[in-house]
Image (spheres, rainbow, N blue to C red):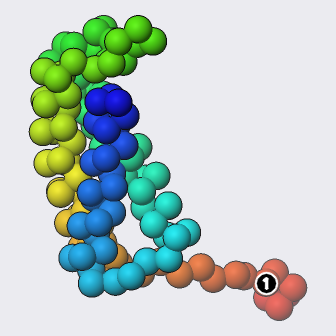
Amino acid sequence: MIGFICLFLPACFSVFLFEKILKADLDLKNVLGIYSLNNLLINGLIFALKRFVFGTADIPFISLETDTTPRAAISFIAIALISAVVLAVAEVFVAKNFKISLQEVNDEEEK
């Protein structure tokens, strides 16, 4: 249970912060998309830190017999929550300052 909380809760917090800072009410499709992206980014960052900075990537985080130890969970959650806040602020900045638009080019009209 501790491992589940560590892996999936920080992205929920990040989406919550994103909605509150942006002052928007997102639909389910957007929430799931942002949650999935945030989950990948937060956990990817932490796994990279565990691999390249801390050198603890060889230690299993969760196994079939035991759950995550509280010591590992505290350090994981601390990094994850900081990452979640930074990610939410960065996403709000991008959402407010950048617009993506698609333009379909019809080749027949150009000829």
Apparent side of residue 104 relative to residue 60 in the rendered image (left or right): right
The quarter in which the C terminus is drawn is bottom right
Residue shown at 21%/42% (left/top)? Answer: 80
Q: Name the residue furthest bottom.
A: 109
Residue shown at 29%/66% (left/top)? Answer: 16
Q: Residue 78 is drawn in which quadrant?
A: top left
- Name the residue carrying label 1: 106
Q: Residue 14 is drawn in which quadrant?
A: bottom left
For label 1, the crowd category at 10 Å Cα-Cα, with few meaning under 14, some 14 to 19 and many 20 or more, is: few
Residue shown at 30%/8% (left/top)? Answer: 58
Nearest the viewer among 103 and 59 is 59
On screen, 34 above or below 108?
A: above
**Picture mark count:** 1
| Image location of residue 75, percent across then percent down | 13, 29
Q: Secondary structure at mark 1?
A: loop
The quarter in which the N terminus is drawn is top left
| Image location of residue 90, percent across then percent down | 23, 64
Apparent side of residue 85 relative to residue 25 in the rendered image (left or right): left
Residue shown at 19%/13% (left/top)? Answer: 55
Apparent side of residue 83 relative to residue 16 in the rendered image (left or right): left
Apparent side of residue 76 relative to residue 103 in the rendered image (left or right): left
Asked if one can make out residue 44 in the rendered structure from this viewpoint, the answer is no
| Image location of residue 64, percent across then percent down | 45, 12
| Image location of residue 10, percent across then percent down | 27, 48
On screen, 9 above or below 95?
A: above
Asked if one can make out residue 17 in the rendered structure from this viewpoint, the answer is yes
What's the residue type where badge 1 is placed? Asn
On screen, 68 above or below 13?
A: above
